[in-house]
Image (cartoon, helix red, strand yellow):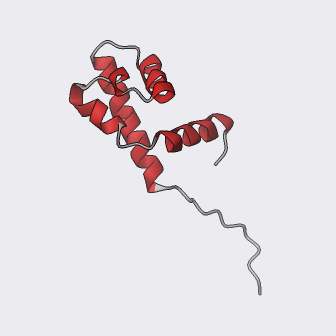
Amino acid sequence: MADHNTIKFSLRNPKDDEMKRILSEVYNALVEKGYDPLNQIVGYLLSEDPTYITSHNGARSLIRKVDRDELLHQLVKSYLGIR
């Protein structure tokens, strides 16, 4: 007899979790230094200029570990509610 229950699988990518962790750490470092973290991160994403990100707590080194195109892709998907 066939089982007709729907099974949902989570296809979370561990890379996405790592990007989120890094972005959170960068955000927190910017806040600690008194910067507007959203403006700074957007400035970095638009220009790829790492000086938008403070070196406090290694944030500048961290943000450079994230592929900018992948991050933008994930941000747009999240904004649109796409999984």
Q: Is residue 62 above or below residue 50?
A: below
Q: Measured from the top left, where is residue 37 in percent x and y? A: 41, 20
Q: Measured from the top left, where is residue 36 in percent x and y? A: 41, 14
Q: Residue at x 49, y 56 (%)?
A: 13
Farthest residue, direction left: 57
Q: Quadrant of residue 78?
A: top right
Q: Measured from the top left, where is residue 4 in percent x and y? A: 77, 74
Q: Where, quadrant-wise, is the N terminus in this rendering?
A: bottom right
Q: Residue at x 28, y 36 (%)?
A: 61
Q: Quadrant of residue 82?
A: top right
Choose between 63 and 27: the one closer to the eye.
63
Q: Residue at x 35, y 14 (%)?
A: 35
Choose between 50 and 14: the one closer to the eye.
50
Q: Residue at x 47, y 39 (%)?
A: 68
Q: Is residue 10 above or below residue 71?
A: below
Number of residue marks: 0
Q: Is residue 2 left or right of residue 68?
A: right
Q: Quadrant of residue 72?
A: top right
Q: Is residue 35 above or below residue 64?
A: above
Farthest residue, direction bottom: 1
